[in-house]
Amino acid sequence: MPNFSLLNPKEKLLEPIQETFKYSYKVSVGEKILKLKFKLSIKQEQTDMNLREQTNNEITKFKKFSEETEHLKLMEMERIKLMEKRCLKRNLYEEHGKQEKRKINKLGLGPEIKASKQE
């Protein structure tokens, strides 16, 4: 603890207390798990307005994390759908051979895939 003189009454006797709250979230996206970390630091000497502003800033940061996570989740779901579509096409190719492969390519997805999508 530092030495304080009586000549300088403006000096504070105690160091400001700082509390840090840490939050972590796990979000599953397909087979991947994304980890988000959210940290909020509060100093005791801050005024209510500063505290409110800092809290709002931290909440805004967390909302951005949430939006990014949602975007990543959608991107991963699209990637998974594309992979499933490729696997279905590959299975059709293997089942029907090269002659059918041309027909499947002309149709786009193949008759079985179109029928399964309509159901």
Image: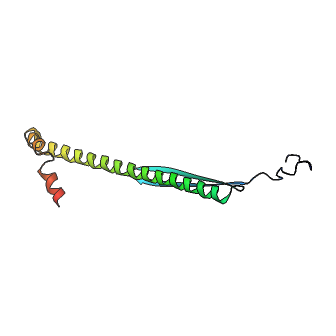
Report the front residue among 56 and 25: 56
Q: How many marks?
A: 0
Q: What color scheme is it?
A: rainbow
Q: Residue furthest right?
A: 6
Quick check: can you spot residue 30?
Answer: no
Can I make out residue 71 in this image?
Answer: yes
Q: Is residue 116 left or right of residue 46?
A: left
Along the viewing direction, whichever of 69 and 116 lies nearer the viewer:
69
**Image position, residue 118 (x, y; %):** 16, 59
Quadrant in which the C terminus appears: bottom left
Image spot of residue 45 (x, y percent): 72, 55
Q: Is residue 95 left or right of residue 10?
A: left
**Residue at horizontal 16%, vertical 52%?**
113
Above or below, 102 relative to 7: above
Residue lying at 89% horizontally and 46% vertically, measured from the top left: 3
The spot of residue 61 in percent (x, y) is 51, 51
In the image shown, does 38 or 98 lie closer to the viewer?
38
Q: Residue at x 84, y 51 (%)?
A: 10
Residue 75 placement (x, y as % from top left) = 34, 48
